[in-house]
Image (cartoon, rainbow, N blue to C red):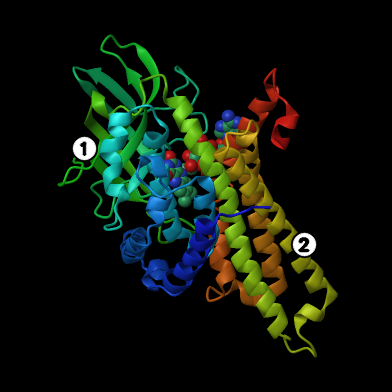
Amino acid sequence: MESLSSAQTALRFAAREFAQEHLRQCDPLVETGSTPQERFAASRPIYQAMVSAGFLRRCIPAPLGGDGSGLVDAAILAEELYGENGGISLTLFGTVLGLMPVILGPNDELRDRVLAPFLKTSGTPLSAFCMTEPGGSANISDSVPVEGLRTIALQKQGGWQVSGAKKWVSSATGWDGKGAELLCIVCRGIDDAGQELGTGILATERPQSGIVELSVARLIDSVGHRAHLLPEFQIKDLWIPNQNAVTPMGEGGAVMAGAFTATAALVGVFGVALMRTAWEYTLNFAKTETRGGSKPIIEHQAVGYALADAKSTIEAARALSWRACIALDNNLPGAEELAIHAKVFGSERAVEVLGDLMKIVGVESYDRDCPLAGLMQDALALPVFDGGNMGVRRKQLHQIYQLKDYDQHSTLA
Ligand SMILES: Cc1cc2nc3c(=O)[nH]c(=O)nc-3n(C[C@H](O)[C@H](O)[C@H](O)COP(=O)(O)OP(=O)(O)OC[C@H]3O[C@@H](n4cnc5c(N)ncnc54)[C@H](O)[C@@H]3O)c2cc1C
């Protein structure tokens, strides 16, 4: 299916080794800390180790100073890391998402300036793509008067004054609640005459003292991704100069769509990663456990067939997700559609397969000490994040099929 370069094969083994050393056996507080802040703080040394290992640089394209050769590199990392700890891995991929607007956007000067801290192999730099808002964001592209997007940027002399609220944005308020190193904020521009200018993306770098115009309303205690920070926060009169405009107002939609197309393919890989870890655990359980019977449970045909069905799904989801990544890396015509299929299929099948594997293991799977429970908690996020499959992703496919020049054969390229 995939033909990896020698550098990519080396990355796969380095990431697998890292995952076993740092993610499989890690500080228990990462999962069991009593508050989201405590769990996130406990994950910081592991995130730092990921940065030191060069994994963040590997997600930044080489022509921009990183080590990345494309989305396939990120897919390799995702499959090896995410199945061992989804929460901490998502801190890495959330930061990559936070950088995507500046990577994809047209402002070269901004890109060179703000990427610098993320190219180092030291520290714990965070970046966040601030799109989602309290009250829902599935209709973010709907224009006024519907107000799918409610964060406002008022045009002033030399820049923009931004106010609004955001929710569910990975790592956005940073390690100390005063802001990630870089925030890319999706907002609606309004000029000084009160005229709507459409959707834009503005970037703000955290000053040393933190962003004082940002206040945390609450840290979400999410079902899974326990080590991951998901704040709800307010932005009040945040000043962003013109040189920090990622896109002009009215031109943010395409960059936003580009960023969320790449992540769609990766979410398919996240599903593969969770299923793969769960399948390996279940296979071992089935081969070693008799559950009081005369033979290991794998010898019961029902168990063997259920394992086979689960493995077929994993292989299919992997093939689709990798195909989408390769199509995106090569700008193939069906790339967007493939990426969305990978997201929908990989995410929904992961929830199903996790449930099926829990049935094979039986009641022991319902103990928190069994890894399947934690994997299921993480899997539940996949269909509802990165653009929910109902409100966003199927809607995108529906829109693609309504295009006059839609060609179903484009995914064969
Ligand atoms: C772990 C995690 C990390 C996240 N990280 C980020 C991040 O870094 N940045 C960020 O901005 N967001 C982030 N999110 C939020 C995430 O991306 C959401 O998927 C996104 O905000 C959209 O949510 P939604 O699709 O549920 O939309 P909502 O607007 O909340 O819609 C809810 C439901 O309403 C229905 N609906 C609404 N409109 C329509 C419609 N037009 N057609 C059909 N049905 C409709 C659907 O049933 C939909 O599921 C994160 C979420 C999680 C859980």
- Residue shown at 40% from the left, 61% from the top: 227
Q: Distance of mark 2 from mark 1, alpha carbons? A: 52 Å
Q: Which mark is residue 311?
A: none
Q: Please, is residue 198 above or below residue 291 in the view?
A: above
Residue 37: name its quadrant: bottom left
Q: What secondary structure is marked by label 2?
A: helix
Give the amino acid type for the residue marked by disc 1 in the picture.
Glu
Residue 257 x, y percent position in the rendering: 50, 31
Q: Which residue is mark 1?
A: 213
Q: Between 70 and 239, which is closer to the camera in this rendering?
A: 70
Residue 75 x, y percent position in the rendering: 54, 52
Horizontal side of residue 21 vs 244, given as left or right: right
**Residue farthest front in this picture:** 6
The quadrant of the rendering that contains the C terminus is top right
Horizontal side of residue 45 vs 284, given as left or right: left
Q: Nearer the viewer, mark 2 or mark 1?
A: 2
Q: What secondary structure is marked by label 1?
A: loop
Horizontal side of residue 4 vs 413, given as left or right: left
Q: Which mark is residue 309?
A: 2
Q: Between 262 and 345, which is closer to the camera in this rendering?
A: 262
Say few, some or many: other residues with alpha carbon within 10 Å of mark 1 (under 14 / 14 to 19 / 20 or more): some
Q: Please, is residue 10 above or below residue 162 in the view?
A: below
Q: Can residue 220 be seen in this snapshot?
A: no
Residue 91 x, y percent position in the rendering: 40, 54
